[in-house]
Image (cartoon, rainbow, N blue to C red):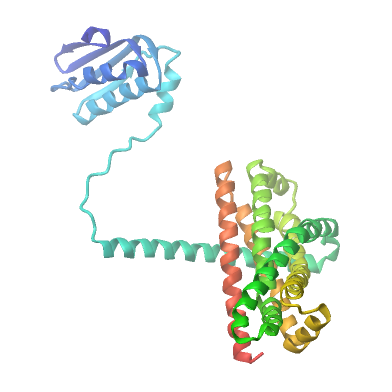
Amino acid sequence: MAADWIEETRAPGTLVLAAQGRWIASQAGAIDRRLSGIKAAGARRVRIELARLEALDTTGAWLLLRLQRSLAKDGAEATLDNPPPDFAPLLRQLQKQPIREAPPPSELSPWPILLLNHVGAGTVAFLAMARGQLGFFGLVVVTALNVLRRRSRIRFIPLVAQMQKTGVSALGIVGLLSFLIGVVMAYQGATQLAQFGAQIYTVNLLGISFLRELGVLMTAIIIAGRSGSAFTAEIGAMVVNEEIDAIRTIGLDPVELLVLPRILALTLCLPLLAFYANFMGLLGGAVVCWADLGIPFPLFAEQLRGAVSLWSFWLGILKAPFFGATIALIGCNEGLSVERSAESVGRHTTLSVVQSIFLVIVIDAAFSILFSFLRI
């Protein structure tokens, strides 16, 4: 019945609507059908009286506000009058929210336009990300130079702690995966070289591939997923808990306190981890060569010495500090970019890993081109 929800009283130029009953979600359908027939009908002023409301929830309040705004669009001055004290705060809160109109239907753009729009948006996002990373790199460099000018500010205890977390604690996973990759490479290489009766050159394949590329690259990817993501999660959690604000409040620099020890630790540890990965990968290959091909360890070592030069070893190790600094830089930057929500921590942690692996491979490709150009 109409009287259950709202009563209309009309006077010249004025319309009074008295809401009553329980305006709650379970009655929303009936209330909505009742309100759909209410029009200003030439009234210049509309008063929506709320004094007789018995119950009101968010759905009912939204229906009242929608009625008010609908009447205002008809040219009437609509007001909500005399709300009960218990309901007034809810109405005031909802009145602050903007009305989101459904967008008008538009014609579908041709697929080339949609493709160009997608590519353009991705390019702009990529350039914005690159600009942010470059700006953060500059901030880190300036902070590092300021710390070097006053060496008493170098924090050795956090540095050693981070080296233990990112280096020593990673030996297990790096060693195991490198050993298994060496096993796989030896089996696959021996299978192919057996067609030419050249199984002994499996040692050459292992030595060159691991020392120049695979050892350091696999180590960097493992560390990006392990330590880079940890940097983002740790610093991001501090942002969510307002610990970063507290650090700034007491006059300390978060970059100096949190970022520099992590970057320096990973820059120092990654070459050592790459060396360890090289050793474990070659060990895995040597075990396969001994067990499957009958190549004893002394012969494996002799063939390896003739297959690779000292440069092959150093070319892989020289790339490691750049990989470590890149992973730490991205991990810390994404951590400081976290907004104050758990969802943001997860999103930026994912971005940290993806960006780190992408840039590690890009830097590795750039080194390969440089070494090829220099003929080394």
161 vs 333, nearest the viewer: 161
Residue 71 lies in quadrant: top left
- Labels in figure, total: 0
Q: Quadrant of the N terminus?
A: top left
Going by the image, does 209 lie left or right of 11?
right
Q: Residue at x 31, y 23 (%)?
A: 63
Q: Quadrant of the C terminus?
A: bottom right
Residue 270 at x, y = what percent? 74, 68
Above or below, 104 relative to 59: below
Residue 82 lies in quadrant: top left
Residue 109 at x, y = what percent? 24, 58
Residue 213 lies in quadrant: bottom right
**Residue 341 shows up from this direction:** no
Q: Residue at x 36, y 19 (%)?
A: 25
157 vs 137, nearest the viewer: 157
286 vs 372, nearest the viewer: 286
Residue 91 at x, y = what percent? 40, 22
Going by the image, does 347 lie left or right of 205?
left
Q: Residue at x 82, y 65 (%)?
A: 150
Instruction: Farthest residue to the bottom: give it.
Output: 375
Above or below, 57 relative to 95: above
279 vs 4, nearest the viewer: 279
**Residue 167 shows up from this direction:** yes
Above or below, 371 relative to 98: below
Residue 10 at x, y = what percent? 17, 12
Above or below, 365 relative to 259: below
Q: Residue at x 79, y 68 (%)?
A: 148
